[in-house]
Image: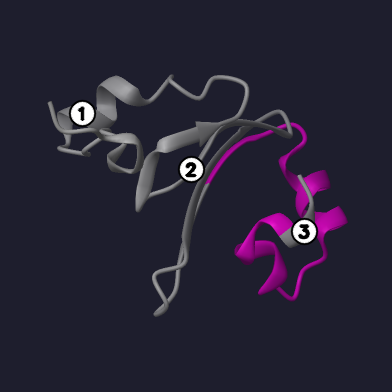
Amino acid sequence: MKAADYNWFRQSVVSEAYCMAFVQSLDSVSHYCNVDADDRFCWMEDGEPRVRFEPLFPYYRDGAEPDSLVEAMLQVGVDLRDYDNHTDA
């Protein structure tokens, strides 16, 4: 993960190297949101991203297991339909 990819790294006074060293042996979850609706969710395991996505666009997920939270997301009402690729029948 590069510092330029995630706003929470760019806005942090802590260096990316420190953050990555900190999460190397831990499971961690980060959610960042600002007044411009820029937000990110990231679940890391042993320093590797398991699930990453922008909550405004939850259908675009990446990481080692991008679909591992789909069931929980649906249970809390997250709309996973991709409206960008939607066509009317």
Image quarter hosting the N terminus: top right
> Residue at horizontal 16%, vertical 28%?
75
**C-alpha distance separating marks 1 and 3:** 30 Å
Name of the residue lying farthest toward the right:
17
Residue 6, magenta (yes or no)? yes
Sequence order check: which comes first, mark 1 or mark 3? 3
Callout 3: helix, strand or loop? helix
**C-alpha distance separating marks 1 and 2:** 15 Å
Sequence order check: which comes first, mark 3 or mark 2? 3
Q: Do tag 1 and tag 2 residues touch (Cβ < 8 Å)?
A: no
User: In the drawing, does residue 29 fall left or right of residue 49?
Assistant: left
- State which quadrant residue 6 falls in: bottom right
> Residue at horizontal 15%, vertical 37%?
77
The magenta segment: 5-29
**Which residue does the numbered mark 3 point to in the structure image?**
3
Q: Do tag 3 and tag 2 residues touch (Cβ < 8 Å)?
A: no
Disc on res. 74: 1
Q: Amino acid at mark 2?
A: Phe
